[in-house]
Structures are given as C-alpha cells and as structure tokens.
Amino acid sequence: MGKTLLKPGGKVGTARLSGNSGLVFRIDGLVCYLPPHEMHSMCARGSAPVVSGDGDRIGKAWLSPLLYPEKQDLTLHVGNRLFSLSWPDVERIIARKRMEAPLYSLGVPCRVGSE
C-alpha cells in the first residue's frame, strides 16, 4: 500500500489587502478572497471560508502553528492544495505597511509507493 505525502513547493502566488481588513490571494491564475468579516471570525472560531469572486466557497483558511506553539501562519486549503502565508506578513498587509506578500505552497498531495 502506498501512502500520501506532500511534495514541497515554493512561492505560488501573492496576498494583498482587500477592503479594510480582508485578503485577496492570487494563486497560479486563480483569484480568491478571505473577506474582512470572515477574517475576524476566523480568529474567534478557528477557521473561515475562502471564497471566489462570485462568493462561492472554494476552500478554507485557519491559523496554524507549523513550527512554533504560537500562531505563526495563515494556512489555506484550496482544491487539493495547501498554502501558507506568514502571520507577520498578514499583520503588515492589514496595517498597510506592506502592499503584498508571497504565498507559498505547502505541497500537493500525491500517492507514492502504490504497488
């Protein structure tokens, strides 16, 4: 039996401010949003929907402690892929101290060793 692994990825897109405190993500030609009201509720609830320009839910976002116990990253699950944006970059974008920040792929699920 094979097991599912994540192939490491690199920079695949950008994140920018959308509205007063929401985010817009551009990922390999796809544009999706984390609306301001969802951004605030994500901090309270733990996750929020990622939506298309039409408002359709296409993924999910949450805060992740990937390397440290503190919340250090905003993680997105869109389609079958995972992406990461550092929380300090999120704060800089919302504070308008940075126009955009890189969005990184955490990998693409793939099957290995299936025989």
Image (cartoon, grey):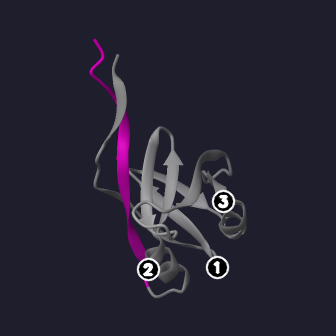
Distance from disc 1 to disc 3, alpha carbons, whole Å, reads 21 Å
| Mark 1 or mark 3, whichever is nearer to me | 3
Residue type marked 1: Asn
Q: Nearer the viewer, residue 70 or 57?
A: 70
- Residue 94 occupies which quadrant of the picture? bottom right
| Mark 3 element type | loop
Q: Main secondary structure of the magenta part?
A: strand
| Residue contact between numbered discs 1 and 3, judged by CB atoms under 8 Å | no
- Residue 113: within the magenta? yes
Q: Is residue 32 above or below residue 56?
A: below
- What residue sits 50% from the left and 40% below the top? 79
What residue span does the magenta drawing correspond to? Answer: 98-115
Give the label on residue 41, or none.
none
Distance from disc 2 to disc 1, alpha carbons, whole Å, reads 13 Å
Distance from disc 3 to disc 2, alpha carbons, whole Å, reads 26 Å
Residue under label 2: 99
Image position of 44 (left or right of 14) = right
Q: Nearer the viewer, residue 33 or 103?
A: 103
Residue 21 spot, x, y in % from top left: 62, 76
- What residue sits 46% from the left and 88% below the top? 97
Residue under label 3: 46
